[in-house]
Image (cartoon, coloured by chain):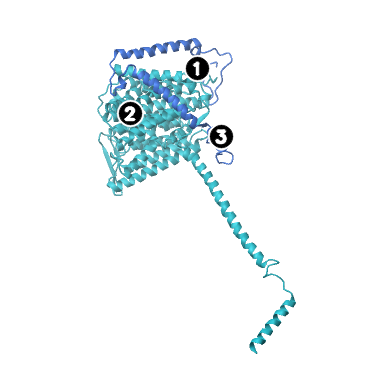
Amino acid sequence: MTVSFPPGLILIAGALLIPAVRGGLRNLLVMGLPLLTLVAVWMVPEGHTVTMPFLDYELMPVHWTSTGRVFATVFAIMAFAGGVFAMRQARVLELAAAFAYAGSAVGVTFAGDLITMFVFWELMAVGSTLVLWASDQSDAYAASIRYLLVHVFGGVVLMFGVVAHIAQTGSVAFELMRPDNVADAMILIGFLINAGAPPLSAWIADAYPEASPSGMVFLSAFTTKTAVFTLMMGFAGSEILIWVGLYMAVYGIVYALLENDMRRILAYSIVNQVGFMVTGIGIGTEMALNGATAHAFSHIIYKALLLMSAGSVLYMTGKRKCTDLGGLFRTMPQTAIAGIVGALAISSFPFTSGFISKSMINDAAAHEHLAIAWFVLTAASAGVFLHAGIKFPWFVFFQKDSGLRPSDPPANMIWPMWLFAAFCIGLGVLPGPLYAILPYPVDYVPYTANHLVSQFQLLLFAGLAFFVMLPLMKRTLTISLDWDWFYRRGGTVIGREFAVRTGEVREHVVAAALRRIRAVIDGLFRSHGPVGPLARSWPVGSMVLWVAILLLASLVVYL
Amino acid sequence: MSDPRRMTEPGNPPTKAPDEPEHWLVRPATIRNLWIGSCVVLALMVAGDLFIDQYEYFGLDGTFGFYAWYGFGTCVLMVVGAKLLGVFLKRKDSYYESSADGFPDVNGPNGGGGR
């Protein structure tokens, strides 16, 4: 049997059913729909394309690519684990929205034309905003509106680019482009906004941590990684992406180091990790693209694991700030182990999934002799261990004892953590199956003596730096200003400045007008006032005198 | 906590009992041993460079113990750099919260310059 409809539609249609049923049937849907999607993804035959006429165009709602299949596979796995994690605790709206969101992301990975891609792209924005609306955190609504504004803006930019691209080339096909003309540059900017590239990168750390404990697990996976997929299909090898990616990798570390909210630390580290992938896409060699694809796969799993661990802590304690947490390893051992495994994987520790994927990107930079890229990526690899690998588990599960003694969360939250922890280690020990489905043939051996020694040196000395610098890392009750200041505060400041300036002008205008009016009144007063020449009362005698003079004058004239 | 397997109420965790014994992992002796053990591992890792022939792409990356000193050095730089940047970028975490009239108060106690 071949599947000739977009596999993502299973999740989207199923999402509409979720609120309609309850109890065991709903649980069955939550676990069954992602698995069904996974099967459908693998039943689309290699190279298969389904076309559909729409207006004057041939749409390709199903277009098989090897890269798309890798992303769709991990999206379906993610929807399964996230669904189980959310099943009993999340609101129904969140579950349904998250599934529609996941389905749209799968839809993008099979889109062969720009119009189909755009439709699923915008559905993702709607689904993810609804996930935020289902949140139980107090600031979620305001954050969701800021989130929506950024994505609607990104959507408009993308739409502009797509329309201009179709007008220029006459083709709707989603193929490799070069950002050397306005249309394709706009498409690139639209993709990059969803990837969390500067300057609009603050939305990730602003909105995601306001989602519910399970909501952020979903949010971390789909939007940025779909952007990575579209960048790979549309702009592989565009050099500007190297620089954008390097900026993101460093930005994520610096901001995460300053951050106090545990889930915001992890949000910044999403930007950091996507930075590695974007750099790989910019390098654009087969090895780099394989590395970026494999890293997206590993990243979705270990990031979800980290956020499940953080979400469990938030769910059980109701607290998010490092300053309120600490010492939880005593009573939440399973959550702590999940967090530590995720932290080791994100740090690319040997024998975890991050090691077998990220080292491909770094080595691709070395093979191409991109010195700056390689030195920055290597420093950023050490920095990942610093800001996420140690900082997250240390401040949440160890450091000072907060005195809190919560237990591990309920079973449906524990099991997905074990599943993903097993994935993190399994992929690290046996990378073969993942390497086998990558877009290009893999000729790469991650486990060599050189690799192991250099990676252990890099990470362990980064760890040493953490504990040596610990006094400098003391958590404070602060946030850090980012580019979002311009749309959150800048408007107010400009508005106030405008009000002050226009206030001065108004005062001048009013004063000048008052002066004019006063001058008119004064003039009228002079001529028509009680003593003005035109309003004086004249004595009868003077009138008689003037009449006599006029009569005399007429007499003289006419005589 | 009487039974460690019983789930506590979500969002409202119990706190430490006054008679709770100190966990072995946080005793000063354990921490000292961890430091000693870690230093031995660090030294072994650097010594590993003696036995392998590191690839060299850029010159600098072939120096002895490159990954050790580069990892340590860049991490110190990043922490110090972040700290310096924090002087300019850090604000109280209530910075963006609105005041009573629905407008963020630019000159109020939460806003304004580098506080």
Instruction: Classify residue A254 by image quadrant.
Output: top left
Image coordinates for residue A438, horizontal then vertical, percent: 28, 29
Name the subunit of mark 1.
A
Disc 1: which residue: A330
Could you tell me which secondary element the residue under label 2 belongs to? helix
Within 10 Å of disc 1 (Cα), the crowding (few <14, some 14-19, many 20+) is: some
Disc 3: which residue: B110
Chain B, colour shown: blue
Residue at mark 3 shares a chain with residue at mark 2: no
From where the camera sits, is residue A263 visible? no
Q: CB of mark 3 within 8 Å of CB of mark 1?
A: no
Using the image, determine if residue A422 lies above or below residue B112: above
Q: Is residue A415 left or right of residue A518?
A: left
Image coordinates for residue B29, horizontal then vertical, percent: 49, 9
Q: Tag on residue B14?
A: none
Within 10 Å of disc 2 (Cα), the crowding (few <14, some 14-19, many 20+) is: few
From where the camera sits, is residue A48 visible? yes
Instruction: Classify residue A302 by image quadrant.
Output: top left
**Circle 2: residue type:** Ile
Residue at mark 2 shares a chain with residue at mark 1: yes
Which one is in front in this view, the residue at disc 3 or the one at disc 2?
2
Using the image, determine if residue A24 lies above or below residue B104: above
Could you tell me which secondary element the residue under label 1 belongs to? helix
Image coordinates for residue B14, horizontal then vertical, percent: 56, 21
Which one is in front in this view, the residue at disc 3 or the one at disc 1?
3
Disc 2: which residue: A372
**Circle 3: residue type:** Asn
